Amino acid sequence: MKALLERGHVYATRPPLYRIRYRGETYDAMTDEERDRIIAEKCNGKPDQVQRFKGLGEMNPTQLWETTMNPETRHLKQITVEDAAAADRMFSVLMGDAVEPRKEFIKEHAPEAEWVDI
Amino acid sequence: MEAPAANVEHVRVEDEMEQSYIDYAMSVIAGRALPDVRDGLKPVHRRVLYAMHEMGITSGASHRKCSSIVGETMGDYHPHGDQPIYNTLVRMAQEFSLRYPLVDGQGNFGSMDGDPPAAMRYTEARMAPIAEELLSDIERDTVDFQSNYDDRLTEPEVLPAKLPNLLLNGSSGIAVGMSTNIPPHNLREVVDATTHRIDNPDCDVEELMEHIKGPDFPTGASIVGKDAIYSAYATGRGRIRMRAEYEVERSESGADRIVVRELPYQENKARVVERIAEDVNEGVIEGVSDLRDESDREGVRIVIDLKRGANADVVENQLLEHHLESTFGVINLALVDGQPRVLTLAETLDHYVEHRKEVVRRRSKHDLDEAKDRAHILEGRLEAVDKAEAIVNLVTESADREQAQEVLEGNVDPRTLDVDLDYPEVQSSFDFSEEQAEHILRMQIGSLTSMEAGEIEEEYEEIQAEIEYLESVLASEEKLLGVIKDELRELREKYGDDRRTAILEDEGEVTHEDLIPEEDNLVVITEQDYIKRMPAAEFDPQRRGGKGIIGSDPKEGDRVSKVFRANSHDYLCCFTNQGQVYRLKTYEIPEMSRTARGKSAINLIDLDDGEEITAVVNTDEFDEDECITMVTRRGYVKRTCVTEFDNILSTGIIAAKLDEGDELVDVEVTDGTGDLVIATEGGMTIRFDEDEVREMGRSARGVRGIDLEAGDAVAGMVSTDDDDGRALLTVTKNGYGKRTPLSEYRPQSRYGKGLVDIKTDDRNGRVTTVKAVEENDHIVVMSEAGQIMRCPVAEISTVGRNTKGVIVMEVEGDDRVASVTVVPGDASK
C-alpha cells in the first residue's frame, strides 16, 4: 500500500451525490449547495427528479461510466504521501491499538466533520 | 495507468484519512449507535416504529409479516441492511431484552439461550401498546420532521415519547471512541422520580433514589450493593453487580441441590450452563453430581445436584464467583442536541421533562389553532341560523354560488345586483369570513332546525372552554407541567408493574480466600498475555527425555513465554521485561484446564504492548532487610530493598531503569550475604559476592554484572550461599540440560567474562534459563507451543561444569523450551 501511495497510484473516486433531471437534461451535484444552485438556476426551482446516490450500486452501467469512470468527466482525488512520518502518525492514531489518542482526536476534530450521515 | 488530466485533486493521505475518519466517527456517534436522550431511541428503532405507525400496524391491528415492516423501514427511512433492521425489530419484541417491549411479536423471536429468531418471512409483529404512547400526538405538530434519505418523505427527528423510554428500556451501543450502556428501569419508579423532579427541580440523587431504587432488569435476578447504583446515577458511570436468583434446597438424604430461577441481564443461559459444566468436568467446581437445564415456557430453571456430603456453601460460592454473577458497566451516554454526553440521572430526567414541555406546548398550540378555527366556523353557523330566512332568500335569488358567497362575505352589496331580495338591510350587512361563507353554503337545509341550533350552541360553548383551557396551559408553566405529570401518572396506572430485580445490600467484599484450597499452582503466561493457573499436583512426574503433555493451547502466532510456581494464597510481585512491577494474588488468576489457552491478563494486570512478565517473587517471603536483586539482558545488576516495593499501584511501579533496548530478565530475593550467579544464553556464568552490588533506589539502572561477548545476553540468575548444597540446573532451548553443584562455580570479581557453564552447540541451542535446585526438587519445563513436563531433578545426572548435558525434554520441529520453574518434590506427589 505504501509503495502504491508513494508512486501516486492510489486515487479516490468522487461520484456525484445528486443527479437532478429537468426537461430531459441531467445535472450532477457533488454537494447540497451545488444541488440547490442547480435547482434554482437550471431547473426554475422545480426539478423533475432529484436522485440521491447512496452508493455506486445504485447506478446503471452507463451512469457509472459517466460519473465515475470516464476520464473526461470523472472527478478524482489523488492520494499522495508528502510526509511519510505524518502519514504514519495519523494511521497509528486512527487505527492503532491505543484508544486514548483516538478519543482525543475525535473530541478535537468533531466540529470539522463535513459529511455526517444521520 | 494513464494520467487523468482533468478533474484531479491532490490530497495528502493523512488529510484524507483525517477527514474521512472524522466524518465516519461523527456519523456513527450522532446518527447510528447512540440513543437520543428524549425518546431513548437510536435512528433505526425510531424508523422501525415510525414505519409501523405509517403502515397502521398498531396494537389494535392484526400482526403483519416482519419482512414487510423491514422492507418499509429500509425502503423509506433506513438505507442500511435488512438483517440489522430485523434484529432491531426482534430485540424490541424480546421480553428478556426489553423491560417494556415495544413490539408485540407473533412467532419465534429467539430465546435466552441465544437461539436465533425465525426468518423474517415467518414472523409477524405489531406495535405493543406502550410503543403507541411513544408515538402518540405525532400528528399534532409536536416534533420536527426531516427529509428522509431520498428527499421523498419526511420522518420524525424524535418521537413525542409520552414515557421516558431511555430509562425504561435502557440502551447499549458501541460508537467510535465511545460507547453507551444504560440499564432498564421500572416504570412506576421512573414516573415517580420524574414527577418528583418536576416538583423539586433542585433535588439531589438521594431524593431521586427514594423513587428509583436502581435498575430493573427484564430477567429479574438481583443487584448487589447500592454504591455502584449511586455512582451510576450521580456520575453517569458505575459498575453494577448482578447476581442470579437461586435457592439452595437442603435435603434429608444429604444430597442438596441448587436451583437457579433467574439469570443476570444479558446472560446467555445455554452458555452459563455450558460453562458450569466445563468447570465441573475440569474439577474447578467440585461436589456436583448432575447439572440440568429444566427451563421451559414458564421460566428459567437450572438444577445443580450436589453429591452426597458435598459442602453446598463452597459450591454456591464457587458458582457465584464464576457463573452466577456478572457486571453491568453503566455508561449513561446519550445524544443531547445531537452531541454525545455522559449524563447523571437528574440530567437525564431534566432533558426528558424539557422535551415533554416542548411537545405539550406545541400540541396545545396546535389544538388551540384547531379549536379557534372550529369556533370561528361555529360562530358563522350560529349567525346563519339566526338569519336563516335572509340567507335562504339570498341563495335562492343569487345567480350562482360565487355570487352568493361574495354577498355573504360582504364583498358585494346585494342592492347593486339585479336580484329581488326580501331582506336587503340584513343581506347587505353580511360580513362572514371566507371559511364561514363556504361552510354556510355547504350546510344542509335540515341543520337549520332549532334543535340543531341548540347543539351548535352547546358545541360552541365547549370549544370556548377548551380554548380557554389551552390558552391557560400555554400561559402558565405550572399548568403545562401539571399536564405532563397527569399524563405520566395516567400511564403509570396503565402500564406500571412490580419491580423484578431485587436490590441487596453488599455483605462486604466477599473474599473467597477461605474457600480456596492452599496448593501449589503452575501459572502459565503467553506472549500475548493470556494467563491461567493449574494445580501443580495435576502433573505427574515423568522420566526425562519425553515430549511432555499439553499444558496450554496458545492461539496461532502466540506462544508460551513463562511458567512459574505459586501457592494459590501467594501475593505475587510480577516483574516485567520493561522494568515495571505489579502485584497479583495467585487465586485471582483464573484456574483453567491443561488444554485451555487462559484468559487475557488485561483484567488483572495493566500490561503495555510488548510488555511481558519475566520474573515473579512471592512477597510473603519478604523480610525487611532483604533485597530484590535484578538482572537485565545486557548484564546490568542491581539490588533494591524490599521495603521500596511496599506500595505497588494497580498500574504498576518502576522496578528498574533500563537502557533503550535492554530488558529485565530475572529477579531473586537475597539477604546480602550470599553470592549471585549470572548465566548467559551463550552458556557462560559468573559468580560474585552480592556485596559487590550496592543497594540502590527503584529507579536506578544498576551496575555491570557480567562482561558479555558480542551477541550474548543474560538468560537468568540464581543466588546461593557458600554451602547450601544446591546445584545449578541449566536448560537449553533445544531441551537439553545439566546439573552441576554450585560449589563448582568459583567466585570471581564482578564484571568479568566468567566461566563456561554449558556448551551451546547446535544440539543444545542457547541457554533458556538457570535454576538453583535441590536433590528432591522437581522441575517443570514448558515449551513455546504449550507442551509441559514435570520431571524430578534426580533424573538429571550431576555432571561437571563445562559439559554438554543430557536430553531433558524432547521438543518437536521448531518448538523451543520457553521457561522452567522449580516445584518442591515433596509438596505434592
Image: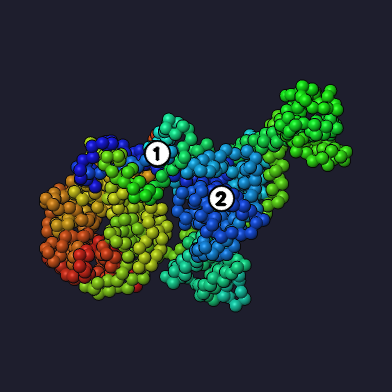
Crowdedness near tag 1: few (<14), some (14–19) or many (≥20) residues, C-alpha within 10 Å: few
The mark found on residue B51 in the picture is 2
Color style of the picture: rainbow
Q: Residue B607: percent from the left, percent from the top?
A: 34, 50
Crowdedness near tag 2: few (<14), some (14–19) or many (≥20) residues, C-alpha within 10 Å: many
- Disc 1 target residue: A25
Residue at x 54% of width, y 59% of height: B66
Q: Secondary structure at mark 1?
A: strand
Q: Residue B208: percent from the left, percent from the top?
A: 63, 42
Q: Residue furthest bottom?
A: B253
Residue B303: quadrant of the picture: bottom right
Q: Residue furthest right?
A: B450
Q: Secondary structure at mark 2?
A: helix
Residue at x 20% of width, y 67% of height: B813
Any part of residue B58 in sight: yes
Q: Residue furthest front?
A: B418
Q: Is residue A78 left or right of residue B744?
A: right
The one nearer the camera, B281 or B62, is B62
Residue B100: quadrant of the picture: bottom right
Residue B766 sits above or below residue B371 on the image: below
Label 2 marks a residue whose chain is B
Which amino acid, mark 1? Glu
